[in-house]
Amino acid sequence: MTLQARRSRPPRFTFGAAVLVLGIAILAACDPSRREVISLPPTPSISGNLGWILVKEAYAPVMAGASEALKELGHLRDGSILEVEARDYGPAGDGSTILWYRINSQAAEGWVSSREVEVFSSKLQAESRGGSGK
């Protein structure tokens, strides 16, 4: 009877050991003292292809911002059609919150209350409802 020398095998990691090592690596990477702070720009007002407004009041006030409490910059006449640059919610004079539309044209620049206008997806639709396109 001959004795054979036993071959030594390199140690094998089991699945459980691999998960344990991976877990320790993840926890080490999540060390709060090494936390990276990412600064994002503020969320802009809703914008992009927002449609066209048709002024439905005799003289719709144009405000400096999305609020009736801000400075009045001018007026838009009934039938004026303007492209919407942005939308935002803001306070109305009665304490409620309403939708405001930002406009910027030769006629005026500022914010108009949703109470003063109708909104359409195209200039053609606004014109067909009786707007002058000015």
Image (cartoon, rainbow, N blue to C red):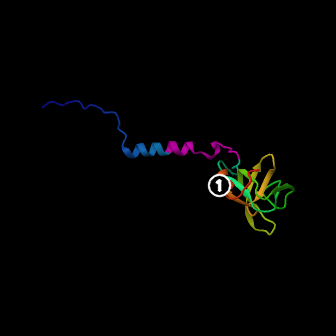
From the viewer's perspective, is 21 left or right of 133? left
| Quadrant housing residue 66 | bottom right
Location of residue 43 in the rendering, given as x and y in whole percent from the top left corner: 69, 50
Q: What residue is shown with label 1? A: 125
From the viewer's perspective, is 46 left or right of 107? left
The stretch drawn in magenta includes residue 27: yes
At mark 1, the secondary structure is helix
The residue type indicated by label 1 comes to: Gln
Location of residue 3 in the rendering, given as x and y in whole percent from the top left corner: 18, 31
Residues rendered magenta in the picture: 24-41
Q: Residue furthest left?
A: 1
Going 70% across and 45% down the picture, which residue do you hit?
Answer: 41
Location of residue 70 in the rendering, given as x and y in whole percent from the top left corner: 85, 58
Location of residue 84 in the rendering, given as x and y in whole percent from the top left corner: 71, 51
Going 63% across and 53% down the picture, which residue do you hit?
Answer: 121
The stretch drawn in magenta includes residue 112: no
Instruction: Say if 7 sits above or below 45 in the image.
Output: above
Q: How many marks?
A: 1
Relative depth, front residue between 14 and 110 = 110
The quarter of the picture where the N terminus appears is: top left
